[in-house]
Amino acid sequence: MTPSKTHLVLIPSYNTGETVYHTVREARQQWSPVWVVVDGSTDGTDEGLLAVAAQDSQLHVIVLPHNQGKGAAVLHGLREATRAGFTHVLTMDSDGQHPPEKIIEFMQVSQANPDALVLGRPVFDASAPLLRVRGRKISNWLANFETMWQGIGDSLFGFRVYPAQMLLDVMENNYWMRHFDFDPEAAVRLCWCGARPINVDAPVKYFSAAEGGVSHFNYLRDNALLTSMNLRLFAGFIVRLPLLIWRVLSP
Protein backbone atom coordinates (compact mmCIF):
# COMPACT_ATOMS: atom_id res chain seq x y z
CA MET A 1 0.00 0.00 0.00
CA THR A 2 1.41 3.38 -1.05
CA PRO A 3 1.32 5.82 1.87
CA SER A 4 -0.97 8.78 1.33
CA LYS A 5 0.66 12.18 1.38
CA THR A 6 -2.62 13.99 2.07
CA HIS A 7 -4.91 11.77 4.16
CA LEU A 8 -4.09 10.02 7.42
CA VAL A 9 -5.99 8.04 10.04
CA LEU A 10 -5.92 9.72 13.47
CA ILE A 11 -6.84 7.64 16.52
CA PRO A 12 -7.14 9.30 19.95
CA SER A 13 -6.80 6.70 22.69
CA TYR A 14 -7.34 6.65 26.44
CA ASN A 15 -7.17 3.51 28.60
CA THR A 16 -8.75 1.01 26.20
CA GLY A 17 -6.27 -1.74 27.09
CA GLU A 18 -5.53 -4.48 24.58
CA THR A 19 -8.34 -3.30 22.30
CA VAL A 20 -6.24 -0.42 20.98
CA TYR A 21 -3.69 -2.83 19.50
CA HIS A 22 -6.41 -4.61 17.54
CA THR A 23 -7.84 -1.28 16.35
CA VAL A 24 -4.45 -0.02 15.21
CA ARG A 25 -3.59 -3.30 13.51
CA GLU A 26 -6.88 -3.30 11.60
CA ALA A 27 -6.48 0.35 10.62
CA ARG A 28 -2.95 -0.25 9.35
CA GLN A 29 -4.17 -3.12 7.19
CA GLN A 30 -6.48 -0.64 5.49
CA TRP A 31 -4.42 2.55 5.35
CA SER A 32 -1.09 4.26 5.79
CA PRO A 33 -0.14 6.31 7.57
CA VAL A 34 -1.94 5.84 10.88
CA TRP A 35 -1.30 8.14 13.82
CA VAL A 36 -2.28 7.43 17.42
CA VAL A 37 -2.49 10.08 20.13
CA VAL A 38 -2.24 8.42 23.54
CA ASP A 39 -4.14 10.79 25.80
CA GLY A 40 -2.37 10.24 29.11
CA SER A 41 -3.27 6.54 29.33
CA THR A 42 -2.23 4.74 32.50
CA ASP A 43 -2.76 1.20 31.19
CA GLY A 44 0.71 0.80 29.68
CA THR A 45 -0.49 1.05 26.09
CA ASP A 46 1.74 4.06 25.46
CA GLU A 47 4.86 1.91 25.76
CA GLY A 48 3.29 -0.92 23.80
CA LEU A 49 2.26 1.34 20.93
CA LEU A 50 5.66 3.01 20.82
CA ALA A 51 7.22 -0.46 20.53
CA VAL A 52 4.91 -1.32 17.64
CA ALA A 53 5.66 1.99 15.93
CA ALA A 54 9.39 1.31 16.20
CA GLN A 55 8.80 -1.62 13.82
CA ASP A 56 6.35 0.17 11.52
CA SER A 57 7.37 3.36 9.73
CA GLN A 58 3.76 4.12 8.82
CA LEU A 59 2.59 4.16 12.44
CA HIS A 60 3.26 7.35 14.38
CA VAL A 61 2.50 7.56 18.11
CA ILE A 62 2.14 10.79 20.07
CA VAL A 63 2.06 10.42 23.87
CA LEU A 64 0.50 13.17 25.97
CA PRO A 65 1.71 13.40 29.59
CA HIS A 66 -1.78 13.49 31.11
CA ASN A 67 -5.38 12.99 30.07
CA GLN A 68 -6.81 16.08 28.38
CA GLY A 69 -9.91 14.82 26.57
CA LYS A 70 -10.73 13.45 23.13
CA GLY A 71 -10.93 16.82 21.42
CA ALA A 72 -7.64 17.94 22.92
CA ALA A 73 -5.98 14.73 21.71
CA VAL A 74 -7.33 15.29 18.19
CA LEU A 75 -6.06 18.88 18.32
CA HIS A 76 -2.53 17.71 19.16
CA GLY A 77 -2.65 15.33 16.21
CA LEU A 78 -4.04 18.01 13.89
CA ARG A 79 -1.24 20.42 14.70
CA GLU A 80 1.42 17.88 13.83
CA ALA A 81 -0.47 16.58 10.80
CA THR A 82 -0.87 20.02 9.18
CA ARG A 83 2.77 20.83 9.88
CA ALA A 84 3.68 17.60 8.10
CA GLY A 85 1.63 18.63 5.06
CA PHE A 86 -1.47 16.46 5.49
CA THR A 87 -4.72 18.02 4.32
CA HIS A 88 -7.29 15.59 5.77
CA VAL A 89 -7.65 13.34 8.80
CA LEU A 90 -10.00 10.45 9.37
CA THR A 91 -10.75 10.18 13.07
CA MET A 92 -11.76 6.89 14.64
CA ASP A 93 -12.05 5.66 18.22
CA SER A 94 -9.61 3.19 19.69
CA ASP A 95 -12.23 1.06 21.46
CA GLY A 96 -13.17 -1.11 18.50
CA GLN A 97 -16.61 0.39 17.85
CA HIS A 98 -15.69 1.98 14.52
CA PRO A 99 -15.34 -0.04 11.28
CA PRO A 100 -11.75 -0.09 9.93
CA GLU A 101 -13.00 -1.86 6.80
CA LYS A 102 -14.70 1.41 5.85
CA ILE A 103 -11.54 3.52 5.97
CA ILE A 104 -10.72 3.24 2.26
CA GLU A 105 -14.27 4.08 1.19
CA PHE A 106 -14.37 7.18 3.41
CA MET A 107 -10.95 8.32 2.21
CA GLN A 108 -11.99 7.91 -1.42
CA VAL A 109 -15.11 10.00 -0.85
CA SER A 110 -12.96 12.69 0.78
CA GLN A 111 -10.38 12.63 -2.00
CA ALA A 112 -13.15 13.14 -4.56
CA ASN A 113 -14.70 15.93 -2.44
CA PRO A 114 -11.79 17.66 -0.66
CA ASP A 115 -13.90 20.53 0.70
CA ALA A 116 -16.50 18.19 2.23
CA LEU A 117 -16.97 16.86 5.73
CA VAL A 118 -17.41 13.11 5.32
CA LEU A 119 -19.60 11.92 8.18
CA GLY A 120 -20.19 8.37 9.28
CA ARG A 121 -23.88 7.56 9.63
CA PRO A 122 -24.02 4.71 12.17
CA VAL A 123 -25.85 1.52 11.40
CA PHE A 124 -26.70 -0.06 14.75
CA ASP A 125 -27.12 -3.73 15.51
CA ALA A 126 -28.83 -5.41 18.45
CA SER A 127 -25.87 -4.67 20.74
CA ALA A 128 -26.57 -0.93 20.72
CA PRO A 129 -28.04 0.37 24.02
CA LEU A 130 -31.55 1.65 23.34
CA LEU A 131 -30.99 4.70 25.54
CA ARG A 132 -27.98 5.73 23.46
CA VAL A 133 -29.81 5.21 20.16
CA ARG A 134 -32.83 7.26 21.24
CA GLY A 135 -30.81 9.93 23.01
CA ARG A 136 -28.68 10.75 19.97
CA LYS A 137 -31.82 11.62 18.00
CA ILE A 138 -32.11 14.77 20.13
CA SER A 139 -28.48 15.72 19.48
CA ASN A 140 -28.92 15.09 15.75
CA TRP A 141 -32.04 17.24 15.56
CA LEU A 142 -30.30 20.10 17.37
CA ALA A 143 -27.25 19.89 15.10
CA ASN A 144 -29.45 20.05 12.01
CA PHE A 145 -31.50 22.91 13.42
CA GLU A 146 -28.31 24.84 14.21
CA THR A 147 -27.11 24.39 10.62
CA MET A 148 -30.47 24.99 8.89
CA TRP A 149 -30.70 21.33 7.90
CA GLN A 150 -27.59 21.25 5.76
CA GLY A 151 -27.49 17.47 6.13
CA ILE A 152 -25.71 16.23 9.25
CA GLY A 153 -26.74 12.58 9.31
CA ASP A 154 -25.29 11.92 12.76
CA SER A 155 -23.61 14.49 14.99
CA LEU A 156 -22.06 12.11 17.53
CA PHE A 157 -20.46 9.34 15.47
CA GLY A 158 -16.74 10.08 15.49
CA PHE A 159 -15.80 8.04 12.42
CA ARG A 160 -15.42 10.83 9.87
CA VAL A 161 -12.98 12.66 7.59
CA TYR A 162 -12.21 16.32 8.28
CA PRO A 163 -10.48 18.95 6.15
CA ALA A 164 -7.57 19.31 8.55
CA GLN A 165 -6.76 23.01 8.26
CA MET A 166 -10.40 24.03 8.51
CA LEU A 167 -10.88 21.98 11.68
CA LEU A 168 -7.61 23.24 13.14
CA ASP A 169 -8.60 26.87 12.54
CA VAL A 170 -11.96 26.29 14.23
CA MET A 171 -10.39 24.62 17.25
CA GLU A 172 -7.55 27.11 17.67
CA ASN A 173 -10.14 29.89 17.85
CA ASN A 174 -12.41 28.07 20.27
CA TYR A 175 -11.82 27.40 23.96
CA TRP A 176 -14.24 24.45 23.89
CA MET A 177 -14.33 21.23 21.83
CA ARG A 178 -11.76 19.50 24.03
CA HIS A 179 -13.82 16.66 25.55
CA PHE A 180 -17.02 14.79 24.60
CA ASP A 181 -18.35 17.98 23.07
CA PHE A 182 -15.82 17.64 20.26
CA ASP A 183 -17.70 15.51 17.71
CA PRO A 184 -21.05 17.34 17.58
CA GLU A 185 -19.54 20.82 17.85
CA ALA A 186 -17.00 20.07 15.13
CA ALA A 187 -19.76 18.96 12.76
CA VAL A 188 -21.84 22.09 13.37
CA ARG A 189 -18.97 24.58 13.23
CA LEU A 190 -17.48 23.11 10.04
CA CYS A 191 -20.89 23.37 8.38
CA TRP A 192 -20.95 27.01 9.48
CA CYS A 193 -17.57 27.42 7.79
CA GLY A 194 -18.95 26.07 4.52
CA ALA A 195 -17.93 22.41 4.61
CA ARG A 196 -20.60 20.35 2.83
CA PRO A 197 -21.57 17.24 4.82
CA ILE A 198 -21.56 13.94 2.96
CA ASN A 199 -23.02 11.01 4.89
CA VAL A 200 -21.76 7.46 4.44
CA ASP A 201 -23.28 4.49 6.27
CA ALA A 202 -20.97 2.67 8.68
CA PRO A 203 -21.68 -0.21 11.07
CA VAL A 204 -21.03 0.44 14.76
CA LYS A 205 -20.36 -2.19 17.43
CA TYR A 206 -21.01 -2.03 21.14
CA PHE A 207 -19.03 -4.37 23.36
CA SER A 208 -19.92 -5.52 26.83
CA ALA A 209 -17.37 -5.29 29.65
CA ALA A 210 -16.84 -9.05 29.31
CA GLU A 211 -15.95 -8.50 25.65
CA GLY A 212 -13.45 -5.78 26.51
CA GLY A 213 -15.78 -2.86 26.00
CA VAL A 214 -14.67 0.40 27.61
CA SER A 215 -16.65 3.61 28.01
CA HIS A 216 -15.46 6.79 29.68
CA PHE A 217 -18.80 8.54 29.18
CA ASN A 218 -20.21 9.96 32.40
CA TYR A 219 -23.94 10.54 32.00
CA LEU A 220 -24.18 13.44 34.46
CA ARG A 221 -20.95 15.25 33.63
CA ASP A 222 -20.98 14.75 29.89
CA ASN A 223 -24.68 15.39 29.36
CA ALA A 224 -24.18 18.68 31.23
CA LEU A 225 -21.26 19.40 28.90
CA LEU A 226 -23.39 18.66 25.84
CA THR A 227 -26.20 20.85 27.16
CA SER A 228 -23.87 23.82 27.61
CA MET A 229 -22.44 23.13 24.15
CA ASN A 230 -25.86 23.38 22.55
CA LEU A 231 -26.54 26.64 24.35
CA ARG A 232 -23.30 28.02 22.87
CA LEU A 233 -24.16 26.71 19.44
CA PHE A 234 -27.67 28.14 19.58
CA ALA A 235 -26.22 31.57 20.37
CA GLY A 236 -23.81 31.17 17.45
CA PHE A 237 -26.69 30.04 15.25
CA ILE A 238 -28.66 33.22 15.97
CA VAL A 239 -25.66 35.37 15.03
CA ARG A 240 -25.11 33.43 11.79
CA LEU A 241 -28.77 33.01 10.86
CA PRO A 242 -28.81 35.52 7.94
CA LEU A 243 -25.74 33.85 6.38
CA LEU A 244 -27.19 30.38 6.86
CA ILE A 245 -30.49 31.38 5.28
CA TRP A 246 -28.65 32.92 2.32
CA ARG A 247 -26.54 29.76 1.93
CA VAL A 248 -29.61 27.52 1.98
CA LEU A 249 -31.60 29.67 -0.48
CA SER A 250 -28.78 30.43 -2.92
CA PRO A 251 -28.64 28.14 -5.98
Image: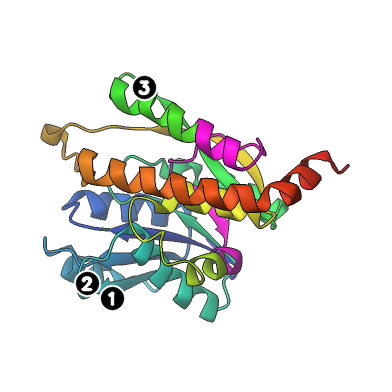
Q: CA distance from mark 1 to mark 3?
A: 37 Å
The residue sitting at 32% across, 48% down in the picture is 225
Query: At label 1, which amino acid type do we have?
Result: Ala
SS of the residue under disc 2: helix
Q: Determine whether label 1 and label 2 are within 8 Å by CB.
A: yes
Rendered image quadrant of residue 127:
top left
Q: Determine whether label 1 and label 3 are within 8 Å by CB.
A: no
Query: At label 3, which amino acid type do we have?
Result: Asp
Provide the residue designation for mark 2.
51
From the top left corner, tell me how far across and down residue 195 is, in percent. Answer: 67, 53
Left or right? Give the position of 85 relative to 206.
right
Provide the residue designation for mark 1.
54
Give the residues drawn in magenta, as a range.
141-167
Whether 143 is among the magenta residues is: yes
Q: Which mark is residue 125?
A: 3
Q: Is residue 209 visible?
A: yes
Q: CA distance from mark 2 to mark 3?
A: 35 Å
Q: Is residue 127 visible?
A: no
Rendered image quadrant of residue 204:
top left
The residue sitting at 56% across, 57% down in the picture is 162
108 and 65: which is toward the camera: 65
